Image (cartoon, helix red, strand yellow):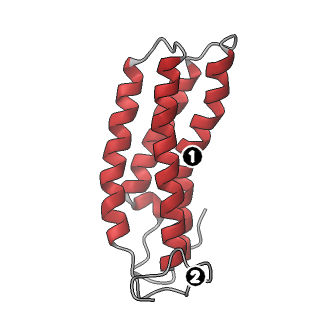
Amino acid sequence: MLPPPDDEDFALPDQLPLYQKGREIFAVTQKIVALIEADEEILVSLKDCMLQDAALLTVKVAGAEAGDLYDLRMENATLIRKAARDLLTHCTSLEMFGYQDVHYLRILRELVEDYRLFFLDWVQGFDPWHAVPDPWGLFNPPGV
């Protein structure tokens, strides 16, 4: 559990629509991969990848919110975007390798699209003036 906020502007991650949608995606992903039979080797190999990517959708939001620095938020946002896109790729892989319950994949894809829209709003709220210069040069605010 996170410590109580010091600042009244600080929002606990579980109160953010993005975080809540990420939890929903994780729950649906768990249900989808639970339908994979143990003898379906290729599909079983995708199971862990899907769960890991779905989990990152909340974990990295929490990390970004706790860090509250532009460069850390952007780094976490990049990892979130990659995890969401990988999750969609895994859905396609499941279809290609014979996953039978493909109608559930449509639900997951729709949830990821909803998540993407929340993500866009969330990233727009990053404060570029609350930053530490990124010595790697990847996540500096515009003009730094």
| Residue situated in front as seen by the camera: 81 or 143 | 143
Inspect the image, locate mark 2, and give the three-letter code of the amino acid beneath it. Asp
Inspect the image, locate mark 1, and give the three-letter code of the amino acid beneath it. Ala
Q: Which mark is residue 55?
A: 1
Of labels 2 and 1, earlier in sequence is 1
Q: Quadrant of the C terminus?
A: bottom left
Q: Is residue 87 visible?
A: yes
Q: Residue at x 48, y 11 (%)?
A: 100
Residue 69 at x, y percent in the picture:
51, 80
Q: CA distance from mark 2 to mark 1?
A: 26 Å
| Residue situated in front as seen by the camera: 58 or 117 | 117
Residue 119 at x, y percent in the picture:
36, 57
Count of numbered circles in the view: 2
Q: Is residue 68 visible?
A: no
114 lies above or below 60: above
Q: Residue at x 56, y 75 (%)?
A: 67
